[in-house]
Each structure stands twice: as C-alpha cells, then as structure tokens.
Amino acid sequence: MAKQPVEELPGMSVPLSQAQSKHSDAKGKEPNRKLKKDKELSRKKNTDKHSASLESARRAKKHPWSPVEVAAVMRHFGEQIRKGKLATMIECQQCKKAEDPALAGRSIQNIRDFVRNRGVTLKRKQNPG
C-alpha cells in the first residue's frame, strides 16, 4: 500500500506545496544552502593549510626562566609583585640594563610579562576559589 503525499499538515495555514514554492528561487531550484558539515570542513581546510606557516612565523619558542633570571627580576620587582602592581616598560628596561648578563636573552616585554604572570599566580594562590 503506497502512501499519498501530504499536502497540508495540521497547524499549517499554507499547503506544503505553496510553502516550498515561496522559498525556491525564480528558476524553481532549491536555494543554495551549505550544510553545517560543509562549513566545518571548509574551516578545517583553511586552518590546516596555514597553521604550520603561521605558527612558526608568529610564535617564538618558549624558553623556561632560569633561577638566575628569576632571581634578577625578583630583586627589582618583588615588592611590586606582592602588591599586585604591573611594571612599566621603563622600569623593565632599567632592570634589564642593571642585570645585563642575566637578562640579556630576555626582551623588555618578556620581563614585563613575567612580572604580571607572577603577580597573577600569587594572587590566585592567596585567594583560592
């Protein structure tokens, strides 16, 4: 026994055939719609294609801070870290110049980031939760 196509569903004011004709374009074809899978696949293709070149170009390799470098920065910014204050670029430049052999491999921004990160870590340990 073959089922008959349903022209009108309960609760619909317009028959199904008329509703479909409203949403199709002038030529009578279905509108061009991409599925969610297509978008995800195209996004994956784009990121995979460029990820290797962008990552190496934009991101430097991480270098862990040695105890000598940490001690040098803490001598200058220990109090500021405890107070939760951020070091200025000028202060970091003075620190780098004063601790020349120890901080020669670090940029001013590296030193500033270290001070901020230590302050955030200390604050998190003091106020758990």
Image (cartoon, helix red, strand yellow):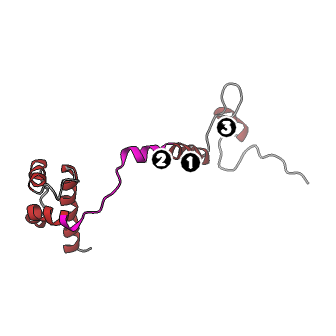
Q: Residues within 10 Å of mark 3 (few under 14, many from 20)?
A: few
Q: Earlier in the sequence, mark 3 or mark 2?
A: 3
User: Is 64 part of what is drawn in magenta?
Assistant: yes
Assign a secondary structure to mark 3: helix
Measure the alpha-carbon separation of dots 1 and 3.
29 Å
Which quadrant: the N terminus? bottom right
Residue under label 3, please give it: 19
* Residue type beneath disc 2: Ala
The residue at 22%/73% (across/down) is: 125
Query: Any mark on residue 40, and which?
Result: 1
Q: Magenta segment, which residues?
A: 50-68
Would residue 119 be seen by someone viewing this image from the given angle? Answer: no
The percent position of residue 114, horizontal first and vertical second, equals 21, 59
Assign a secondary structure to mark 2: helix
Q: Nearer the viewer, residue 67 or 39?
A: 67
The percent position of residue 59, horizontal first and vertical second, equals 36, 49
Q: Nearer the viewer, residue 36 or 22?
A: 36
User: Residue 118 sits in which quadrant?
Assistant: bottom left
Q: Nearer the viewer, residue 55 or 105?
A: 105
Assign a secondary structure to mark 1: helix
